[in-house]
Each structure stands twice: as structure tokens, then as C-alpha cells.
Amino acid sequence: MKAKEKRTLREFDLRRRKPGAKSYCIWDAKTPGLVLRVRPSGRATLAFVFNRSGRTRWFTIGDGVLLSDARRIAAKLRLAVVEGRDPAAERKDRSDAPTFAELAERYVNEDAKRRNRSWRQAAALVSAHLLPKWGRMNAKDVTRAHVRKVIGAIASPSVANAVRVSASAIFSFGVKVEVLAVNPVRGVERNPTQSRSRTLSDSEVALFWPHLSPPLKVLLLVGQRPGEVVAMHRTHIKDGWWTLPGAPDRALGWPGVKNGRDHRVWIPRAAREIIDTMDKQGRVFARAKLDAEMRKICKRLGVTEKVTPHDLRRSHGSTITRLGFGRDAMNRIQNHIEGGVTDTYDRYAYEVENKRVMEAVAEHIVALAEGRSAAGAEVVLFPSKV
């Protein structure tokens, strides 16, 4: 190289530089550490040069950068060096780390598909709300401030909470596989939400029933989770009983049960009549988006207080207790885990009682749907212990 040349750089120097037989540098007299390096090819690159532990370190700023911007960058880098940091090493760490989009994809393929039955819904939320903002960012550069900004921009508190959970799962995975040091979602509070308690009134059962699709009618009659009902498979139905395996089965398109525990429920006559009109092999119902169906039905009927598929399940459960069968029967039939010693050791299946409950509830719902008096169905016809 030539002897050290130092003068106040100008934009002119960046655009029109005379190449030499060897690379040479022009040091900026205005900004300490800023240098223009000109190679024999004529390519000129701005860089910041500093000393770290007795070694000269180069931080390339790039070509095509305005001189004013390069001076601001060099000033920030100089401050980082004064603070004891090594900007060149930090840049290498960031280049080795994945972008947020890459980390999210790795999380789905290596973790979510195996552990999270709702990974598709979570991936859709990430695609809609996070990738447009953070997709190209280095995952290490996403801060708590970034998280608060994205979550705060989502109007729906429940959607914002779901996005927060999805983001946290991705960053926690990054910490687990040691590409991240921290999860920036930690410390970002959930939005307060009210637990839904929506159920169908008697008149609403009659109003909605003619508009419900077969899977929605069966959902209301058997009270299981929407995702389980829409994935109902003939293989799992025998002698009027529907067995819901706790584990997912990809070959059958079965998502598994939320609590991971095998479950068995009686299909009442009214539901069997609907099921018998469906496909005789494989999945009972064609793949359907029940949430979208319910939104369309509510709009068609002019119902302002929306009803969701899960509200149909809740209506079934409330009908069990309304008819006097008790909360234990509701939890048993809807596969809620009670916990404790009793739940662990009481293996009595309650088949006779469950069958009676399911038929009574279905008869009550159908009576309301058809505009008949449901008073008879409200009479408690069961032993004192159910």
C-alpha cells in the first residue's frame, strides 16, 4: 500500500477514484477510523478500522453508501468500541444466526409438527402478523420493543395473545437449540380477555338448527371439540360408540385429543342418523372450516352476538347440567381432566349412565330445534348417582 494518506473525504472521492497498481487507503480527517479503500480494480469500499486487544480490526461499511451515512455509522461503531465491544465480532455472530423467517420454518419442521396439533393455525398467525415485520431480520435482533409494537398493533386481544404465544414458542425453540440467548417475548404481558360463556338459548337452537351443516349439528348433539368432530373417522366408530384416540394419526387425518387422553363417547340416535347419511368409509365429513360457516350463518340470520363452533359444544355441556345430570357427568362426557387421585384410579367407564345422558340431551336439543315442547326431556330420569 501507499504511505498513509489522510484528508477530508468528499462524495467526489467515492465516485471518481483513481485505481493504482496496488490497493491504497484514504483516511477521513473528519471522522476517526473511517477509511476509503481503493482496490486495483477501481472498486472503492468504506470501512471503519479500530484496535481491539492489540489487533487491528476492519468493519466494512460497504460501497454505494453516502459519505454522510458512513460517518454516522462510523461514529456509532467508535462509541461501541469505547464501550468495550467488538463490532466486527458482533457482526459475525449475527451473520451466523438465522433470520426470523428461517428460525420460524425450522421450528415448524423440527418441533411444532411433532408436538403441536394446531401448528397450522399458529403458522398462519405468524405468516400474517410476524413475517411481514420480522421475516428478514436476524432473529437475534428482535427485541422486546419489537414484540410490544407488533402485538400492540393487533386490534383483537385474543388474536394478539395467540400471536404472542406463537412468537414465544419460536424464540423458546431458538434458545433450546442454542441459536439465541434470550426469548424477547418474556416480559411482554398478555392482553386481558374475558372468558366466553356464550350458549344457545332455546329459541336460538330452533333458529340456528335449519342452517347448521351436518358436522355442526353433530357437534351440538355430541358436545366434543370442533376439530375432533370435523375429523371424525369411521374407523373409530363401533356399535354406536365413538373412540377418540389421544394421539394424532396423520394417515387418518386425526388430530388427536387436546389433553392427549383417549376418550369414548356414545353417539345418540339423532347424531347417528346424520352420520349415516355421510360417507360410509374414511372420514365422516368432508374437510370444513366450521368457524367460517358459523360466521356466515350469524350474518345470514342477523345475529349480532356471534356464535362460534365451540359455543355449540358449550351449549351441549350446559344442557347436561341443565337437565340435572351434574357437572361430573359433563366433565366426563366432554373429556375434561379433573385431576387428583380420583381421576387417576376411578376406571369405571360409566357407559350406562353416559349413554342415558347423551340420549336425553340429544332428545332435548332436537325437540327445541323442531319447535316441540322439551319439557319432557327436562325431567330427570336417572339414578341419584350418575
Image (cartoon, rainbow, N blue to C red):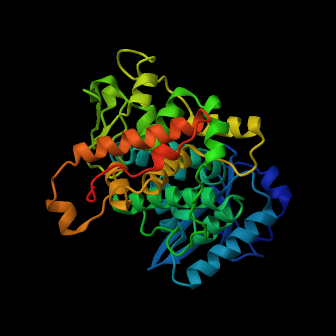
Q: Position of residue 293 (x, y in %)?
A: 63, 34
Q: How many marks?
A: 0
**Along the line of sight, the residue nearer the viewer: 178 or 250:** 250
Residue 104: in sight, yes or no?
A: no
Determine the residue located farthest toward the bottom in the rendered image: 83
Q: Position of residue 349 (x, y in %)?
A: 20, 48
Residue at screen point 65% across, 30% down: 211
**Along the line of sight, the residue nearer the viewer: 312 or 102:** 312
Residue 192: in sight, yes or no?
A: yes
In the picture, residue 283 is in which quadrant?
Answer: top left
Above or below for 8 versus 127: below
**Along the line of sight, the residue nearer the viewer: 384 or 107:** 384
Q: Position of residue 273 (x, y in %)?
A: 43, 23
| Lateral position of residue 377 relative to residue 81, left or right | left
Residue at screen point 41% across, 62% down: 172
- Position of the N terminus, as image quadrant, is bottom right
In the picture, residue 5 is in which quadrant?
Answer: bottom right
| Lateral position of residue 95 relative to residue 172, left or right | right
| Lateral position of residue 138 relative to residue 180, left or right | right
Q: Position of residue 287 (x, y in %)?
A: 50, 26
Residue at screen point 68% across, 71% down: 74
Residue at screen point 64% across, 68% down: 148
In the picture, residue 32 is in which quadrant?
Answer: bottom right
- Position of the C terminus, as image quadrant, is bottom left
**Along the line of sight, the residue nearer the viewer: 27 or 172:** 172
